[in-house]
Image: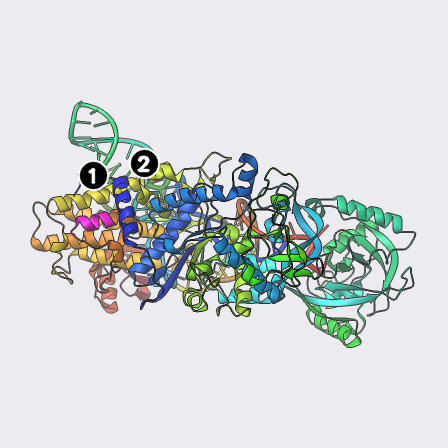
Amino acid sequence: MKEAYFPQEIEKKWQAAWEERGAFYTPDESDKPKYFALSMFPYPSGKLHMGHVRNYTITDVIARFKKMQGYNVLHPIGWDSFGLPAENAAMKHGADPAKWTDENIAYMTKQLKMLGLSYDWQREVTTCKPEYYKWTQWLFLQLYKKGLAYKKEAAVNWCDSCGTVLANEQVIDGKCWRCDSVVEKKYLSQWFFKITDYAEKLLKDLDKLPGWGDNVKTMQANWIGKSEGAIFRFPVVDAPNGETMEVPVYTTRPDTVHGITYLVVAPEYKDIEKLTTAENKQAVENYRANARKMTEIERLSTDRIKTGVPLGTHCKNPFNGEIFPLWTADYALVEYGTGAVMAVPTHDTRDFDFAKKYNLPMKVVIQNPECPSDCSDAAYTEEGILVNSNEFNGMKNTQAKKAITQKAVDEGFGEFKTQYRLRDWLISRQRYWGAPIPVVYCDKCGIVPEKEENLPVMLPTDVDFSVVGKSPITTSKTFKDTTCPHCGGHATREMDTMDTFVCSSWYYMRYADARNHNECFNKDKVNRWLPVDQYVGGIEHAILHLLYSRFFTKALKDCGLLDFDEPFKNLLTQGMVLKDGSKMSKSKGNTVDPDEIFENFGADTARLFILSDSPPARDFDWSDAGVEGCYKFLNRVWRLVSDGVNNNEISKDYMIKFPLARQNDDLVRTVNIAMKGITNDISNDFQFNTVISKYRELTNAIYDWRGKIKGELTAEEKDVFSFAVLSLVKLMAPVTVHMSEEIWHDLGYDSSIHEEKWCEWDENLAKASKITLVVQVNGKVKDKVEVDEGVSDDELKQIALSTDKIKELTAGKEIVKTIVVPKKLVNIVIKG
RNA sequence: GCUCCAGUGGCGGAAUCGGUAGACGCGUUGGACUUAAAAUCCAAUCGGGGUUCACCCUCGGUGCCAGUUCAAGUCUGGCCUGGAGCACCA
């Protein structure tokens, strides 16, 4: 065996060997239980970054560990390869997006292989290939048939710099998630998926996901934003054109309905013109024009002082007959509830601010127990007893909510209402590099879905990327004109493509049956492999991708395509990779290139280090010293083995049998303890950082053991030594995949270590033969005694009481009681 | 404002059930080997105090204040700080 560790050499050798053998090919049929380990697939941007390395290493170690534990493991990879960067590269350098993407995929594939990842490349999925997007389009048609895909004119988020609309989920703080430019509102006719139909299910089924972190689940729950309340309809008493009209409002505080002193409609409210008197028309028009000009950010800022103008008309409160004025103000949002708000300044802080500014009346209807008389320097929003509310006076407001709404239901001017914040998912994109929406506009029949047998609707290649202000797809001469699948007459194709998040909402299902040319996937296969047992990826997808995928799964189940209703059973959201305390980014210039690490230290060092310092869910601070530390550790392991092998002290041939002759050797116990600890640490939340500290502890223990024996080893000692080293190498195999494989062969094995069964330990040996008994007096540690492992509780008590130290401390004192924690601790409680 | 997560040495972090706080590593310091360096190995490393000074004793210590308990980093209540998400959502 070589004396020195040459990672680059052995890594290249084994990567080639594994590839040649098809070592990571996963059969669909197997006697073993299935396990689906999945990383979020990458966008082929050009090069791997450290976030990728962390993500894929975590999943790879899980996959390899599960495989050694006897599972039939599916561990696939693919490419989320539609999207704007390819198109931007095309516009900038005149490159063909397809070619640009292919080149990036080729380079990144090479890098993934250099990292030693155990992917089944036969299942590789690339979303921009016609054989994939054909099925994305087919799924669109299924959703269309179900009424879950529809087109409507709506106020949508427009990113001018990307030249396309965005989904609500892609607007972060009023800015584009991709380019950070301020998003505008536009009225456009666009395609939507009806995710709102699933709002309740998406919310409720979060409870079915104990394997997801609370942070992600609450983020999704917040996003869905369920609230329970009531709709009340207020008749307009003085509509300018004499029409009978009413203004419906949504409220979560029906208990405060007797305190309404005015009503606010959003500037974009559909009936606003009909509700405005001639005298107020000009002022209202001005106000609305102003609101239109404001950006979303300005508009939604909570710090802004509230503004508004009266419409001049009035409504009647059917509960108490009071007449109150209508206003328009931009703190009412047209897209939430009914677009109109009943204002109760005494019990809502926003209404209070507004009423103060415009001197609108206030009326207390919930009594503040702290100051029962009128205290009007702030809105009282807590619980209390109703006053000034007719027959509801004296009722607790929590009860009044229901009672008051019930009255509105009984008398026909309201109902109970559950409201969600979630909006439908806008999937149209005015871009080229995406899956074309498979729909045509027929001169006679209107909107007609493309026939399934005509799929895929191919992306045209005769396009001009130098155009400005419109999608390159519109420059194609071959794409636009087509025939109607229904009547055969002239029709034009939909020019928009689908949001890339549509492609990524089902890719993990395709892995179950990636090469199927007749279906998106075979139902049996998808039901067999899914749901994903362990999904690993960044927290940035907590809402976007993870919510969309959950929606897709539920919708596809309702389409009869599969039988499960949640796609990802367990979710691990890995932390970011930092350098010097901040996120690695090109603009900050603090990136570390994985290629350099592979070259200088090897992939095993990179894998070991990226797992070593922090638990996977936490942020990880990259440090050059840490990398070197890991590299030194691998050298230390290598030296341990190579010295042993070269001195003829370690070999698989010395492993006489298990259990070993010298079971009671401390090293054998140490190895068993390590096996148990490492297995538990991986099984519990993938605590790889402690796994690696246990690798080090075991290595240190083996070194110590060998150092204590002078001269040659006996046959039995060689047995113990070989057992310890073999076990260490096997325990490390999921992480240091190449080094473990190389050592395994150097020890005399022909088969791959990755085909080995995971270590099994002897429960009796997986604990120390001696325990340290801690003796406390009044809860403070006063003494420690080494005792044999099997000592009874009574004996422990006697031992504790009989040490010199304890005798001294308890002399002349009354012992109130003695607590014995088996095999651990005795606490003596004394008085005086 | 609401929701979630976190707070432990110089640093990353460890500590199944409440039971020895600081595993393992990084860094630092000292030493061995060497002509020298690299590599490697050994030792020390929470703070205050004491001492008969390699050992040892003692007090304090896990963001803050209370509480429960024989015993609290861990449980309960109330704060403080940082991060993330949502946010004029009626």
User: What residue do we see at 84% from left, 58% from top?
Assistant: A326
Q: Is residue A311 above or below residue A242?
A: above
Q: Give how far across and how far down residue A239 sits, in percent.
A: 89, 61
Q: Which mark is residue A600?
A: 2
* Mark 1 residue crowding within 10 angstroms, few (<14) / some (14–19) / many (20+): few
Q: Which mark is residue A203?
A: none
Does the magenta portion include A743?
yes
**Dividing the image into 4 quarters, which one contains the N terminus of chain A?**
top left
Residues A625 and A32: in front is A32
Q: Which three-letter amino acid code belongs to the residue tagged 2?
A: Asn
* Mark 2 residue crowding within 10 angstroms, few (<14) / some (14–19) / many (20+): some
Q: Which three-letter amino acid code belongs to the residue tagged 1?
A: Ala
Between the residue at mark 2 and the residue at mark 1, the CA separation in whole angstroms equals 15 Å
Relative placement, left or right, of A556 versus A724 is right
Residue wearing tag 1: A4
Q: Residue furthest bottom?
A: A410
Locate residue A571: give its quadrant. Answer: bottom left
Chain bearing mark 1: A
Q: Residue furthest front?
A: A488
